[in-house]
Image (cartoon, helix red, strand yellow):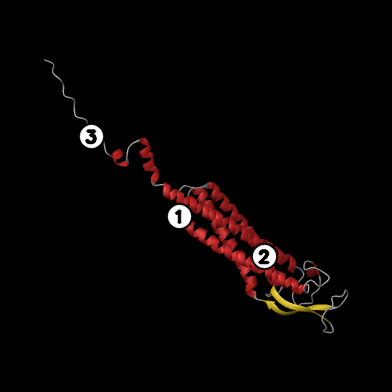
């Protein structure tokens, strides 16, 4: 099947960018999971408490610490990590295959192109769901850390404030914000890959439909049918000489 190099090069570039974006999701989430000792900060609930047990008034210099009532479900963090890992592995495999196609000057079949479109759309919805889940969970954790924005610092600055937990919170905002932005980039790249896969499917379908018709159209333009081109024309009878008397 004829190769459209522009679409294939664009698809290769999208897969290369998705590998980078996927790694920027997996690495921060892994570092955050290690710092939090396997616990998930997303959707965690808690409150601030002073030393005497009273509710905090968020006064400067007041000794208070964060009490986590319930850590977030591990599936919330694992889902985002899974999307990042799948994006990296799939992007590496597909990028290598498309480079091979560019070298061999051929492309996917019609059925393979359809499967690529179907898989890209499915993973697009998965990555979009993971992006929304990570954003909502991160916002919920920030509300817990800042006591619904009543503390004298923002969520970004709270990673440098001692929370007095049994986990390392010195870089949670950097890790989760980087993973959040990268996961949204992964979603955008899956959208681009879905569009490119559909364009390649359309190109393959056009080549499949127009391929068998080209020889017949060429013969019709030349003025003879395919049945006439393969059989020799019958010989003309010799002319009878006329005798003049």
Q: Quadrant of residue 233?
A: top left
Residue located farthest toward the front when viewing the structure as drawn: 245
Secondary structure category for the residue under label 1: helix
| Residue found at x 50% / y 51% | 101
Residue 1 in the image: above or below residue 230: below
Q: Where's residue 186, x and y in %?
A: 62, 60
Residue located farthest toward the top when viewing the structure as drawn: 245
Residue 6 in the image: above or below residue 55: above
Residue contact at pointers 2 and 3, CB within 8 angstroms: no
Q: Is residue 159 left or right of residue 212?
A: right
Q: Quadrant of residue 52?
A: bottom right
- Numbered disc in front, either 2 or 3: 3
Disc with the residue nearer the chain's start (2 vs 1): 2
Residue position for label 3: 234
Residue located farthest toward the right when viewing the structure as drawn: 61
Residue position for label 1: 110
Residue located farthest toward the bottom when viewing the structure as drawn: 52
Q: Where's residue 175, x and y in %?
A: 71, 66
* Dot 1 crowding, Cα within 10 Å, few <14, some 14–19, many 20+: some
Q: Where's residue 17, x and y in %?
A: 62, 56
Secondary structure category for the residue under label 2: helix
| Residue found at x 67% / y 65% | 27
* Whole-number angstrom distance, CA of label 2 to CA of label 1: 36 Å
Identify which residue, 21 or 168, lies in the foreground.
21
Q: Is residue 199 visible?
A: yes
Residue position for label 2: 27
| Residue found at x 74% / y 67% | 173
């Amino acid at each position: 099947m004829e190769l459209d190099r522009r679409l294939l090069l664009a698809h290769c570039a999208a897969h290369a960018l998705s590998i980078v974006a996927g790694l920027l999701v997996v690495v921060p989430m892994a570092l955050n999971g290690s710092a939090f000792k396997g616990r998930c900060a997303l959707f965690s609930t808690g409150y601030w408490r002073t030393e005497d047990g009273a509710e905090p008034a968020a006064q400067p210099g007041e000794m208070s610490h964060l009490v986590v009532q319930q850590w977030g479900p591990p599936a919330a963090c694992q889902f985002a990590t899974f999307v990042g890992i799948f994006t990296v592995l799939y992007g590496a495999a597909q990028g290598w295959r498309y480079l091979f196609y560019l070298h061999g000057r051929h492309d996917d079949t019609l059925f393979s192109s359809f499967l690529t479109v179907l898989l890209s759309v499915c993973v697009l919805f998965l990555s979009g769901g993971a992006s929304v889940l990570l954003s909502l969970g991160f916002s919920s954790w920030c509300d817990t850390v800042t006591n619904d924005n009543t503390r004298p610092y923002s969520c970004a600055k709270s990673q440098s404030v001692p929370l007095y937990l049994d986990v390392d919170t010195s870089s949670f905002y950097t890790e989760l914000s980087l993973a959040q932005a990268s996961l949204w980039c992964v979603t955008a790249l899956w959208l681009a890959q879905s569009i490119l896969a559909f364009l390649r499917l359309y190109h393959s379908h056009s080549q499949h439909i127009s391929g068998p018709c080209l020889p017949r159209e060429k013969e019709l333009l030349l003025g003879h049918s395919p049945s006439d081109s393969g059989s020799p024309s019958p010989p003309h009878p010799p002319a009878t000489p006329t005798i003049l008397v």
